Amino acid sequence: MKYYISLITLALILIGYRSYPADTPKLLTLNECITVALQNNTAILVSEEDKKKAMAEYRVARGQRLPMLSFDIRSQQYPKVTGLSSLYPLYFDMPENIALTYYDSKKQKDEEKNEFSRYYNLGISLGVTAGVTLYSEKKARTQETAKKGIKLSKYQSQKVIGDVIFNVKKSYYSYMIARESVMLRQKLLASNRERLKLTEILFKNALKPILDLTKARYESSDAELSFQKAQNEEREKRMELFRTVGVQDPGGNFTLEDKSDLRELAYSPEELYKLGDQYFPDLQIAKTQTQINRLKVKVEKGGHYPEVELQAGASYENGSLGLTSFGSDLVKPGNWKPSGFVAFVARLPLFSGGIVSARIDSAQADYHKALYKEKETVLNMQATIDNIHTTLRELQKQVALATLMKENADKSMLLAKKSYESGAGTQLDLHEANLSIINAEMAYLKAKFDYLMTMAKLSSIVGLGEDSLCKKQPEKK
């Protein structure tokens, strides 16, 4: 369902340009792409299922400490109530009681044919049994571990969402630069073609050597090849953008946002460290995993502690089942009597053959590994922030230098045009000036792409958007 909603949303965004004039294509913003990707990405759907699984595992761990109620059918043994003939055989063997002794002897033989044992009767019990754990260190720590598992699944989901957003930004910026690169390559191709035509005319008039003509042909072919490569790359980047968003390319023309406002970073490395400690998903996952492994050590140590349970039950019992009259004794109402019990059960492990100690050692090893992993994650985060902070300053200089190159190239083009109009310059001078402008713009594009991607990487670490990370532009008066 989410897929169709996303497809309809993106289709309305991209196809909506048809209601505009032909020269006014629809604007496709970065936020629109991110919104559709978050609705449609399968990795996010998988992370949601992981969160449900973690919640279910917590309910399992919590349920082990809650009262349990069950219906039981079980067999039991009931001690026999011994008759007087068995208790006082000498009295009943006296001569004046010969008849009674004979009768009792015959009755005893008949009962022996019907009995399971000479010392107990077999019975059956039907009833309800309830039990609750009053104290269990192992179960308590297991519940805490499962609760931390819910927290871990949330951080893992945040990481997946952050990765999706970063990938969409990367695809969006790559496609944006590819589009601009195509336009520049097209200008370069047109300039080289004009230069080739001019060189051919000059060569025919014996004003240029064959070397200049060969060079002009090579540069024109190279510019055409570069233009075709740029077109292929633009097509690939467009496909990659829609693949990252999670829908098929609906076709049509559209424009992208203008990302030429490259503002300066407003935070110091120390401030970025603090933001990363609070948000960076990898670090939060590592910290939570350390906490879980610490609890697992306590879970295994709980094997040395006692467990106390309270049990209670209510049932109907039949303790008069005979061997030959089992069926009649089972359905006879007078044989069934109500019964109940309440009991405390305490278990204290005395010897486990070293199993508990070995499990504790294994859990402690995992805990130490998690500590090392957490420390490594902190160091990597700080190193990445330092590198990004330095890289952004350098890219700011590169952007400023590329901007200066563009300004100088524009001035050169203006001078070349004036010289050409006055007759002092040639079209080759115009071509060289135009080539300088294109090269400066290409350098600016590369610096801009690197700056946008570096800022996107920093945003995924500290959890703030690019607008919040950068200094605000002073208001124009």
Image (spheres, rainbow, N blue to C red):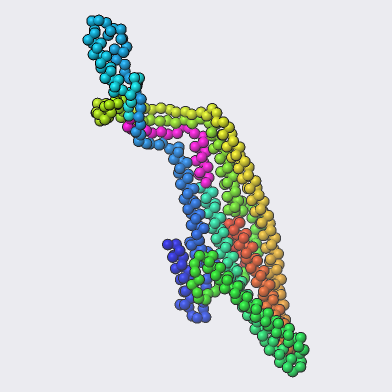
Does residue 405 appear left or right of residue 369 in this picture? Answer: right
Bounds of the magenta segment:
125-149
Tell me which corner region of the image, top left, top right, bottom left or bottom right, holds residue 439.
bottom right
Q: On screen, 278 above or below 82?
A: below
Q: Nearer the viewer, residue 221 or 123?
A: 123
Q: Does the image show residue 150?
A: yes
Q: Residue at x 38, y 36 (%)?
A: 69
Residue 6 relative to residue 263: left or right: left
Residue sitting at x 25%, y 14%: 104
Which quadrant holds the C terminus? Answer: bottom right
Q: Position of residue 220 (x, y in %)?
A: 68, 83
Quadrant position of the N terminus in the picture: bottom left
Q: x, y (%) of residue 262?
A: 63, 67
Count the marks: 0
Is 278 colored magenta in this rendering? no
Residue 431 appearing in the image: no
Res 315 quadrant in image: top left
- Among all residues in the image, which is located at the extreme left? 99
Residue at image position (59%, 34%) is 357
Q: Residue at x 45, y 33 (%)?
A: 133
**Could you say where residue 462 lies in the image, as x and y percent from the top left?**
60, 56
Q: Is residue 109 above or below residue 426?
A: above
Residue 171 in the image: x percent, y percent?
58, 67
Q: Quadrant of residue 428?
A: bottom right
Farthest-out residue, bottom: 205
Residue 36, placed above or below residue 416: above
Check if residue 135 falls in the magenta segment.
Answer: yes
Drawn side of residue 412 relative to residue 41, left or right:
right
